[in-house]
Amino acid sequence: MRLNTKLIHAGQAPDKQNGGVNVAISTSSTFKQDGVGGFRDGYEYSRGGNPSRNSLEETLAAIENGKYARAFASGLAASSAIISTLNPGDEIIATADIYGGTYRLFTKIFPKYNIKVKLLETHSALEITAAITKDTKLIWIESPTNPLLNIIDIAQVAANKPAGVLLAVDNTFASPYFQTPLDLGADIVVHSTTKYIGGHSDIIGGAVITNNAALADAIYFQQYANGGVPSPFDCYLAQRGLKTLAVRMERHQSNAIAVANYLQTHSQVEKVFFVGFPDHPGHAVAKKQMRGFPGMVSFLIKGGRPAADKFFDKVRVFTFAESLGAVESLTCYPYLMTHGGIPEEVKDRIGIAQNLIRLSVGIEDIADLLEDLQQALG
Ligand SMILES: *Cc1c(COP(=O)(O)O)cnc(C)c1O
């Protein structure tokens, strides 16, 4: 099956008993055993496995072109599960302009267990692999990055790292519709399914996808032993969201192109960050590794923080809120919201400026979005 078909059918065969075309929400926490160890369909207790979750995992593996997927209760629970497979003394290499919550895990949680994190202020694949030491076990990248939409050459990082160092790519921004990192040589894909995968701002969820059987076992052990699993209802919502991923992403893209082009010409706008612009520094690599561009557009507003506050106050169709990737357009202030946990001097150095505004362009009528930006910037 091709991607657009997998989104609707992979892991979602009609119900074996009644033919229902949707996967049932399997609410049982426990399953009757036919004698000790006599598991029907392999189910015992829902932390270890649940039909709704396993069905979602099958869909997720298929659409990321992976063999194994594991769903979690949040994107950060998924990230945490990956990092928890490491041992004290192991080192992670990551780039500094990552999601603020991942940054918090790297700097506030895992150092306590002597897992070291080297945060690099670069997007050069060569500089990333040059930083590998004998202790490095994991490279962690986002592409496009959040919120500045920088691009890292995933295939080049994958090609230049030793086999013993795993490459994890947070694919939340691109979604599997526009980018499949396992095809580019990554070992692990991580998602916040809260965003484009769910697509409707109605769940918190995460996922890990890989082709590496040993790693898949270790991630399953994290589900079972650490317990950060999603509810069956949230699994259903993620799967329902996925059915329309293709049509949503196409509209996110066309709306984002129109919004970016509009902002580019506006006298109140100092600079626009959008991967789809040919003069974006990562555009050539993005065209090589992505099939399109998601609805994320950031820009610097003239007039600093006061101008940004005014913009947030005036928007009517865009909603001033955290998060991204859903049908409704959102705007946020990365400096104090998504990236509030990053030290000020780091934010200043890497360009998360006090006049930076992030837009998650939704799938509303583009004319309404442009009119809203016009009146809010006016
Ligand atoms: C939101 C987000 C996360 C964290 O996911 P949660 O579901 O909020 O825990 C991780 N990475 C990226 C890029 C995100 O946008």
Image (cartoon, rainbow, N blue to C red):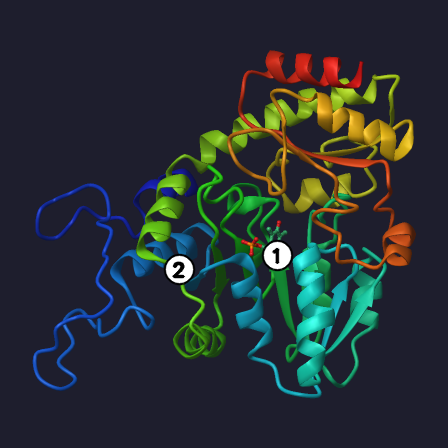
Question: Which residue is at the front of the view, 344 or 212?
Answer: 344
Sequence-first tag of 1 and 2: 1
The answer as to whether callout 1 falls within 8 Å of ligand 1 is yes
State the quadrant of the N terminus: top left
> Of the numbered discs in the image, which one, if any, rests on residue 29?
none
The answer as to whether callout 2 falls within 8 Å of ligand 1 is no
Q: Amino acid at mark 1?
A: Asp
* Residue 37 placement, left or right of 110: left
Residue identifier under label 2: 230
* Residue 43 spot, x, y in % from top left: 22, 71
Is label 2 in a helix, a strand or a loop?
A: loop
State the quadrant of the C terminus: top right
Using a 10 Å C-alpha cutoff, classify the residue at mark 1 as few (fewer than 14 neighbours), some (14 to 19) or many (20 or more): many
Q: Are marks 1 and 2 in contact (CB under 8 Å)?
A: no
Spatial separation of the CA atoms under disc 1 and disc 2: 19 Å
Question: Which residue is at the front of the view, 205 or 148?
Answer: 205
Residue 1 at least partly seen:
no
Q: Residue at x 49, y 72 (%)?
A: 212
The quadrant holding residue 184 is: bottom right
Image vertical order of residue 35 relative to residue 5, above or below:
below
Is label 1 in a helix, a strand or a loop?
A: strand
The quadrant holding residue 159 is: bottom right
Residue identifier under label 1: 170
* Residue 40 spot, x, y in % from top left: 14, 71
Image vertical order of residue 83 relative to residue 265, above or below:
below
Question: Which residue is at the front of the view, 172 or 368?
Answer: 368
Using a 10 Å C-alpha cutoff, classify the residue at mark 2 as few (fewer than 14 neighbours), some (14 to 19) or many (20 or more): many
